Amino acid sequence: MKIAVDERGYYGNFGGAYIPEMLYPNVEELRQNYLSILNDEGFRKDFDHLLKTYVGRPTPLYFAKRLSERYQAKIYLKREDLCHTGAHKVNNTIGQILLAKRLNKKNIIAETGAGQHGVATATVCALMGMECIVYMGEIDMERQKPNVERMRILGTEVRPATSGSKTLKDATNEAMRHWINNPVDTHYIIGSVVGPHPYPDMVARFQSVISEEIKWQLKETEGLESPDYVIACVGGGSNAAGAFYHYYENDDVKLIAVEAAGLGNETGKSAATTTLGKPGVLHGSRTLLMQTKDGQVVEPYSISAGLDYPGIGPVQAHLFESGRAKFYSATDEEAMKAGILLSRLEGIIPAIETAHALAALEKMTFSKDDVVVLNLSGRGDKDLETYIKWGRY
Amino acid sequence: MPVILTKNRIEQLFEEKKENILSVYFTAGFPKLEDTAKIVKYLENSGADIIEVGIPFSDPVADGPTIQESNKTALDNGISLKLIFEQLSDIRKEVKIPLILMGYINPVLQYGVEAFCKKCVEIGVDGFILPDLPLQEYLDEYKTIFERYGLLNIFLITPQTSDARIRRIDNNSRGFIYMVSLAGTTGAKGDISEDQVNYFKRVKKMNLNNPALIGFGISNKLTFNRACAHASGAIIGSAFINVLKNSKNLEKDISGFIKSVKGIQ
Ligand SMILES: Cc1ncc(COP(=O)(O)O)c(C=O)c1O
């Protein structure tokens, strides 16, 4: 199935650029320039060079033998956790900081949930010598303390978002307000495939390096480019978009997206947007959104700060609606267990976001020869406190 | 393009009054849930020319702290679009001046665009300001519906809006253009800067088809008069919300505030 943004910025029924007029010039400047910049040979060279020498790409495609035995399939882990800063988020921030430079922007702002995108942004700003402010929900600052301090060490100012649910949604509101108030020389590095067009497409292109590598790596080990399954967790949907990107049009590859079900979808304490959401508009795009019948955005819940968002990117909403991807959800409990299981079987402590993708293995049935690639989006260092609090290991 | 022959109250007003038009924004369901209709009446009695009734939203990204907080209070009070319509159902028995609903697009989408328009006509609402409904989306999906009901959609321009885009917005507007005075979210400011005045002058020189009202940062007699020197009038929001927030007697305080802005003793 062809999955691509159209000239109006939509994936099927989802997308667009629902932004106040104050942001129009900024977003329009991006829209007009992003493709020519991304396709520019010099830009590509700089991007590839930094991904290789600074981020540490290509990341390994690791055959997880003991995990494979457990689930009776050939399971590969795409090791985005080994990227510099510990998650896939840096692929996007490297791309956007290079783009911001080419647009002559002087200041960078970002929102962050788990702090991974914040750290990845703070990192590239240090690298490029640019001023950086990161908005982070007050509650997230509490549950992701090490990342707050990492950002500060890197020279970034972390500003608490104290409105609403005090999590990722509100950090995004504050970042947008900051951009409205500083429209001229500031670039907003959005951390996922969310926001107004062209962000979802631009971020997906930067993250598409994940499936680009999977293709040739799988060819080397399995002699084929396409697995039977690609599995990824979905907060906004950027690591999933990157892992799915080069497989959209190959319908033999089953795409599996895993959302956070918190305490359970029936409890109301969940962040599983495709189960609980309806079409709506938030943060610049028309997408699936958790909301009341009056159209007020619902405060989501997940143990994982990086999945604790009431929407998903428009491309994910389209993958869901069109049936191209199958969506699962995993509860806090299921994810924590899956995280500990991977630690014990493979010696890899995953980020709790990623643990949700691992939890889907438990819900699926494979044949022995099925080749499964699971995108290991991040490592668990930032989540130690949550693991410790959970305690059952 | 269908042409609406009946005059909309907003257009009527701008035909009759060319200067010092005062438009006042407040958040429905604030400070108390049942205050909505009262505030509309008091505003008309005090001499406001247009009233913008805010539809509260959980995530008002174009708003500064004052209006964010009023949105939150109103939602905590239990306001909804449905309830706003109930509160305003008899408003045209008393109130004659133009009424505009202002808010973010999502609550409207959930209500249903067609049902929303129908209800607005029933009540006597004249138009909308929907800051996160940009021109292109409006043209593609909303324009024909709004026009069928004779409802005006008011667009914003800002100091960063290019001349070409201002022209395009002007050509697709009826009623007036909402001239956002500065690069920023809503909020009361003390004064108007040289840069802002230059921007007002630049727009005035363009001789637009539509009159303009200046909003954002207009808070008192001084800033209202300054703005009125460069446009048909001005819009006050956050400063009025602050009056409501601290008021023990809405009728008296609203009248006092509007009169002080207009310089009436
Ligand atoms: C390790 C990790 N995985 C996944 C996510 C979710 O984001 P996305 O769905 O955009 O990949 C995050 C977000 O912070 C993260 O840190």
Image (tube, coloured by chain):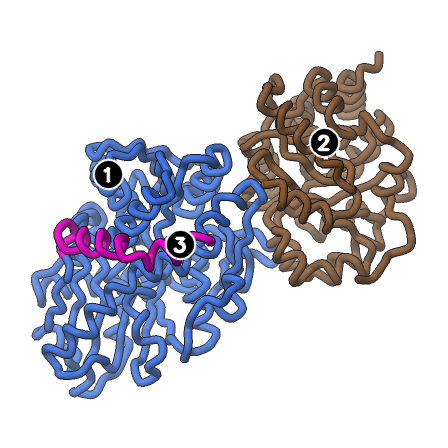
Chain colours: A blue, B brown
Q: Amino acid at mark 1?
A: Met
Label 3 marks which chain's residue? A
Q: Return the residue at label 2.
A: B204
Query: Is label 2 on the same chain as label 3?
Result: no
- The number of callouts visible is 3
Whether B207 is drawn above or below A255: the answer is: above
Query: Is label 3 on the same chain as label 1?
Result: yes
**Mark 1 CB in 8 Å range of ligand 1?**
no
Residue A217, picture quadrant = bottom left
The C terminus of chain A lies in which quarter of the figure? Answer: bottom left
Q: Amino acid at mark 3?
A: Tyr
> Around disc 3, counting alpha carbons within 10 Å, would you say few (fewer than 14), some (14 to 19), or many (20 or more)?
some
The N terminus of chain A lies in which quarter of the figure? Answer: bottom left
Rounded to the nearest angstrom, the CA distance separating label 2 from label 3 is: 34 Å
Residue range highlighted in magenta = A31-56
Q: Return the residue at label 1.
A: A128
The residue at the point 18 percent across, 48 percent down is A85
Q: Amino acid at mark 2?
A: Lys
Question: Where is residue B193 shown, x and y percent of the image?
Answer: 59, 19
Q: Are circles 2 and 3 on residues that touch, CB within 8 Å?
A: no
For the residue labelled by badge 2, is the local secondary structure a helix, a strand or a loop?
helix
Q: Nearer the viewer, mark 2 or mark 1?
A: 2
> Around disc 1, counting alpha carbons within 10 Å, would you say few (fewer than 14), some (14 to 19), or many (20 or more)?
few
Whether B133 is drawn above or below A160: the answer is: below
> Around disc 2, counting alpha carbons within 10 Å, would you say few (fewer than 14), some (14 to 19), or many (20 or more)?
some
Q: Where ligand 1 lies, by image quadrant?
A: bottom left
- Let me know if residue A21 appears in the view: yes
**Residue A234 left/right relative to B241:** left
Q: Return the residue at label 3.
A: A34
Label 1 marks which chain's residue? A
